Image (cartoon, rainbow, N blue to C red):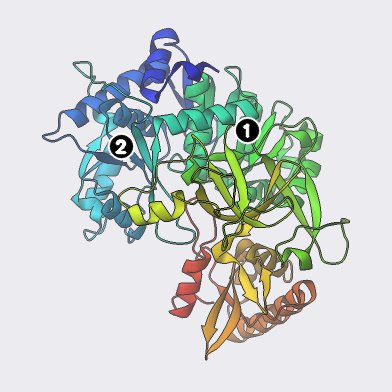
Amino acid sequence: MQNRMFTNLVDLLQYRAVVQPELKLYTYLTDGEDEEVSITAAELNRRAMSAAAELKGLEQKPETALLLFPPGLDFIAGFMGCLYAGVIAIPAYPPHFRRPTPRLDSIIHSSGTTVALTTGQMMADIAGQLDQTSRITTLRLIAVDRLKAAGHYACEPCSGGQLAFLQYTSGSTGNPKGVMVTHGNLLHNMGLIAKYFRLSPQTKIVNWLPAYHDMGLIGQLLMSLMLGCELAFMSPVNFIQKPIRWLKAITKYGATYSGAPNFAYELCVSKFNPETDGDIDLSSWELAFNGAEPVREETLRKFVDTFAPYGFRANSLAPSYGLAEGTLYVSGCKKEEPYTAIWLKSDQLEQNKAVETAAGAPGARPMVACGIIVPEQRTIIVDPQTHIPCGEMEVGEIWVSGPSVAQGYWRNPEASEEDFGAVPAADSPEGRTFLRTGDLGFIRQSELFVTGRIKDVLIVAGRNHYPQDLELTIQSSHPAIRNEYIAVFQTVKDDREIVVAVAELNREHRQRTKRQDDLALLRKEVLAAARTAVAEAHELMLDDVVLIKTGTIPKTSSGKIQRRLTKSMYEEQLLLIW
């Protein structure tokens, strides 16, 4: 791969600008469909130089800079401008105006940043619409779309060990922490992605994932720069409003590589109308990765069944696993045959043993492999209490060691030591430190299976219950429950531990329940249906089901349910109940 010539992204973009100046690296679909604007390698280099000159021209060059951009080309210019100036970039979700900004305030406080790169329009909106209690209003704002061309060479020397950016974690199980990612981490991890997903300069990418999240930034946007290939992208809002836009963009640009979390594939299936959306051709789509949340076998099967008539192939699906602390990619691969799916005995899984059974057998739980364990890094399964490595088909915590593992958490040595300095038990042959991922899984024939997160697992009467399994059962129990918007957790009430499900009411049933009597009756129906389904499938008593307003369950920026935050809101009676 060409990236072996480089130790950092600064040299890489300069190379593209000199050797391939007219290479159209990025095309942004402003309406998600036809309207587009593009930028070449030479243009991106010039814009990055302008942003770098502005940062270096400040009275004191900042150590870090927050990136607050709407979807579009300005983000990548600002990101590379930071790298050119030797300033650590902090990609972040842009603010919702006239609403509190707790996550951004937390990031600003944690990072200590004093500067933000943004656009002229967003700068005006921040000044005119944002609550003045927000920490954003204290930052020095720079509009990268209004900068003049740099009058001098504004590029700092760069090395592979230098920090490129802080990837703030999604906060699905706690407060966000800034993962320190170096240029070397990035190039090593993108090299793994390119190798095992079989990408090349001939790859064509389509993306709708946000640039402030690692899967969108590293897995797709920066892959275009590394490979020297073209990428077309749209706003996440454009996709959510009309999922077929993703598939139509793949058709239009002949994309070979694109992917998203599991919910996106589910959404494409549920919203697809063959009569109005049938003018698609997915035969070019060679690698469709699926990660960032539990990969459901049923979703993959439905996606293949729905889109096979339009050229999509089952062996294009690549279930994957990764995390910000590992830069991004840990496992996943392009296979000649369809993805691996097995069925496990649920009662054995509750005892941390992966025992295979027949599909459809009583108590069988489907599991999808998230790719192979790669030799360039060391991935092991470890008992989270004893730190003794597990054998094959034994469930434990996933630990990772290698050049892609990030440098720790920004200004948080205690958390860094806890998560990045793990050492296996003394009698283990492993002679290195590992990253504790906090995820549970097992290995079967060199393939990694992910079963859930340690902090989310419910322990009832000595048995482990994975919340995603309970949530899937609950969402199928009654049509009033909105798919993928459920959180199950344990809490204490009246000195007794109880199991609670919080679920959003779907829009169709919301229209039918305007009277209080109707809502009370619906709640009883849902509670009875959910309790029956959970009892039958999991031999577990569900103590409470709370129906909340559509669009109010806490989710991370990548779409993961925030179970711990939902639990806290339940305990403090802050949920918006119907």
Residue 350 in the image, given as x and y percentages of width and height: 71, 67
Q: In screen coordinates, is 525 left or right of 383?
A: right
511 lies above or below 541? above
**Amino acid of disc 2:** Ile
Kindly indicate the quadrant of the structure image that contains residue 504: bottom right
- How many numbered marks does the figure carry? 2
Depicted 3 relative to depicted 440: above or below: above
Give the residue furthest to the bottom: 494
Where on the picture, by quarter, is residue 193? top right
Position of 573 relative to 146 (above/below): below
Expressed as whole percent of the image width and height from the top left, the position of residue 558 reads: 51, 50
Q: Nearer the viewer, mark 1 or mark 2?
A: 1
In this rendering, does residue 563 appear at all?
yes
**Amino acid at the residue labelled 1:** Pro
Provide the residue designation for mark 2.
Answer: 88
Mark 1 vs mark 2, CA separation in Å: 30 Å
Q: Nearer the viewer, residue 4 or 336?
A: 4
34, 147: nearer the viewer: 147
Res 233 visible: no
**Lateral position of residue 346 relative to residue 209, left or right:** right
* Label 2 crowd bin: few (<14), some (14–19), many (20+), radius 10 Å: many
The residue drawn where x is 68% and y is 68% is 470
Mark carried by residue 375? 1
- Quadrant of the rendering where the C terminus is positioned: bottom right
Q: At which x and y percent is residue 147?
A: 23, 27
Dot 1: what SS? loop
Contact, mark 1 vs mark 2 (Cβ under 8 Å):
no
**Residue lying furthest top:** 19
- Residue 76, which numbered label? none
Left or right: where does residue 339 sit relative to residue 233? right
Instruction: Give the structural element (helix, strand or loop) at label 2.
Output: strand
- Disc 1 crowd rating (10 Å Cα; few below 14, some 14-19, many 20+) is few
